[in-house]
Image (cartoon, helix red, strand yellow):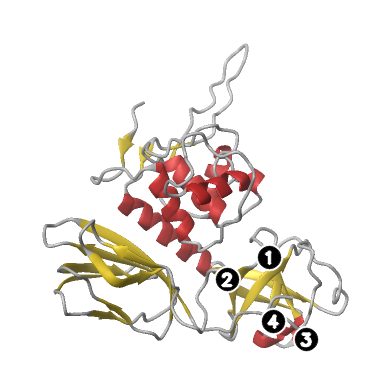
Amino acid sequence: MPIHASAQDAPVSRRDGFLMIWNSIMRSVQDSREEQFLDVLEGTPGFAEIKFAKFRGIVDDDEVTFRPDDPLTLKDGLLWLFRTRSVDDLELMQAEHLPDLLSRYPLGDFLIPGPAAEPRRSRPTVAEPPRVKNELLSRDRLIDLILKFDTLLRDEVHEVSLYAEKFHGKGTAFGEPFDMHALTAAHRTFPHNTMVRVTNVENGKSVTVRISDRGPYVHGRDMDLSLAAFTTIADRSKGKINARFERLGDKAVIASCKGPDARFQTRLSRDVRFVRGIPHSFVLGETLSLAANKPFVVRGVMYPDGTSARLQDFVHPGERYAFKPSREGEYVFRFSLVNGRKRIMRMTVTACAEPVAAE
């Protein structure tokens, strides 16, 4: 059956699609001596990210080529989404697990039922599992998937407990001593040094913690908070609470009280550049100010809750476009030039919080 595009826009390439998914989680890249894909060369866009993802098994590590310029299929886009968000152990996020993952996270009508079992006298057939539709992803469709999935994850309610004196001073799964007075947490799948905002659903109180350990290993429980973190949002006597998680990014790359991320997306085209541009991360409460060397148009902004504001703001040299985020999460800006050429840029906004000191 031929693959067909899922939207009118041209399919996004595997390289660009992966980078869109990867950059939206703000995870740091660590150097690896593992072999890279033969067709992703050092110095080309995404080399470090794709190499690290191959090493971690986020992209298929048993392949010798990545096919960076091929169109991104729905199946691979979904697998990369689930794996980068660490929703389960890696061995439970393979292609055959997509039907189960999509039942947990209803992102769309993406499954085709398999043939039903047929009774036969000699040898009855077995019903085949459903499979993912043979579609390609456009850039806009992928953005919609990322936003919808991250919203589902932020809305999930988890059982959270605390660990304290019994483990204080002992080594964690990552080799550092556990300090019950630090704002840290244990999680089964989130990467080491991931920063997570944990919100008590009963009282709305939040705390930002750093993942420093693995666990908990109690069925139905999703996170252990240090004593300091737990008592910030609940009374110790409760022992366990229900909470929501918001994964903010890696400790090394997320915004802090010092101001916006120093890495900016500056180029609208070869000839049109922002004076500073869109930072990858930004602090809630600050105002973003955009100016360019040539005219550009702000077509619209998509907010973290998925709502969009359609704009038609022309900004000429010497003028500025100001934007103040209203809440945490990812913002998607749609720009164009006066000749109609379009560009999309993303910015993750987090509340100002003092970084946790390294143990």
How many circles with numbers are drawn on the protein? 4
Distance of mark 1 from mark 3, alpha carbons? Answer: 19 Å
Q: Residues within 10 Å of mark 1 (few under 14, many from 20)?
A: many
Residue ID for mark 1: 222
Q: Give x and y (percent) for residue 325.
A: 36, 79
Q: Mark 4 is on which residue type?
A: Ala
Q: Element under label 4?
A: helix
C-beta proximity under 8 Å, tags 2 and 1? yes
Identified at 78% across, 80% down, the residue is: 180
Residue ID for mark 2: 245
Q: Element under label 1?
A: loop
User: From the viewer's perspective, is the residue at label 3 or at label 4 nearer?
Assistant: 4
Identified at 42% across, 49% down, the residue is: 45
Location of residue 299 by image quarter: bottom left
C-beta proximity under 8 Å, tags 1 and 3? no
Residue sitting nearer the eye, 34 or 165: 34
User: From the viewer's perspective, is the residue at label 2 or at label 4 nearer?
Assistant: 4
Residue ID for mark 3: 237
